[in-house]
Image (cartoon, grey):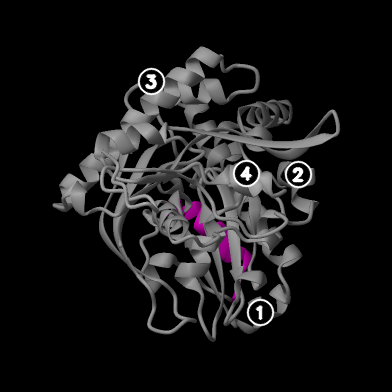
Amino acid sequence: MKIIGLMSGTSVDGIDAVIVDIQNGVEDHDAVRVNVLQFATYPYPDGVRERILEISAPGAGSVEKICHLNAYLGELFAQAAIRIAREAGVELASIDAIGSHGQTIQHLPQPQDESGILVRSTLQIGEPSIIAERTGVTTVADFRPRDMAAGGQGAPLAPYGHYLLFRHPTRTRIVTNIGGISNLTYLPAGATPDQVIAFDTGPGNMLIDGLMREISGGTRVYDENGDDAAQGTCDADLLRSLMTHPYFTSKPPKSTGREEFGAAYLRQIHKEAGSCGINNADLLRTLTEYTAESIVYSFKTFLPNMRDMLETQTIDLLFCGGGVRNQTLMRAVQQRVQPLSIASVEQVGVSSDALEAIVFALFARETLAGRPANLPNVTGSAHPVILGKIIPGRSFRSLGGVSQT
């Protein structure tokens, strides 16, 4: 199947778009084979990122703004799908489906009691009906709510994609994605879906990027290569204080996001650093080390036999996401897992930059095939469920054989 995957993450950098040709492995235990035909990230137009962050802040998003941006982002996601197909030299009519994650503006996985009903909620915008209408391609979107309806947290979802792509018959692997939030997927050798362990480890690039925007007056949105952090010194006392956050000791299944590690949390950290006389360079380095420390803490605390595997080097540590380009961050991780060496998913044949968009292309494929794509032991749902909502394209045929016109 040729599928376009679309997504925008917690960093709100823009729309990742990928067009892939997906094939099954030769044997049942083989990983799915994905040929990336084209990948690109299309930045949001000026001011859109700020508008998304505004409506994502607790108590800040009006109904009118959310309604309008849902439709506008649908147009932008549709444009991204059309553009990636054009750049790949592929006719849209030959695309089997589009899988769109959309843009999360609120994720509330902890149940809230409403008159005896436990309510979990999440909201991704980027209207899929507009994507299907503009492209003519059947679009699958809104993947999280079904898992939450079944009692899960709706996150992390990517581990099922990691299972399809990275499982190995003889090697244990951990796939760590460092986006705005960092998450890991533990795949024991010869893993079956019920053996996968996965959860959000805590902050990824979110705090680092937020501080860069703050200290640069908005002229810089990330620490390129980690060069600025490399000029600072980690404050050990502040790092110890940050690691007392209760999220780190809570047991999986668990997920987190901007609600816990976003702008309000960063303001609190910045205030604490200021009272201790910590300058911006040292704070940036400390936040970088904080991300590394929380990732490796999660390895050693929640994964079976992890300490032994690190010492005996019987495990592959694979990294992906924007964080792999931050060399200071990756060195900090490497120092904490010595003598084991870390690697990028590129080294096992999968594009790191495109991976998240690839995952949502895979989800579209699974949904259209009628296969569940959540992992109950990861999300906490009561049972496996088929994810997403299907918006028919022009070539879609119903069970009765009637074409969409």
**Which residue corresponds to mark 3?**
47
Q: Earlier in the sequence, mark 4 or mark 3?
A: 3
Residue 243's disc is none
Q: Are marks 1 and 3 in contact (CB under 8 Å)?
A: no
**In this picture, which residue range is highlighted in magenta?**
324-339
Residue in view at x 54 percent, y 62 percent: 160
Q: Nearer the viewer, mark 1 or mark 2?
A: 1
Q: Relative to 166, is 52 above or below?
A: above
The reply to whether callout 4 and callout 2 are in contact (CB within 8 Å) is no
Residue 309 marker: 1
Q: Earlier in the sequence, mark 2 or mark 3?
A: 3
- Answer whether labels 4 and 3 touch (C-beta < 8 Å): no
Q: What residue sits right under mark 2 in the picture?
A: 237
Residue in the image at 29% along x and 55% along y: 96
Residue 133: x and y in percent read 29, 34
Question: How far separated are the C-alphas under marks 2 and 3?
Answer: 37 Å
Query: Which badge, 1 or 3, comes first in the chain's sequence?
Result: 3
Q: Position of residue 364 (x, y in %)?
A: 42, 53
Q: Quadrant of residue 191?
A: bottom right
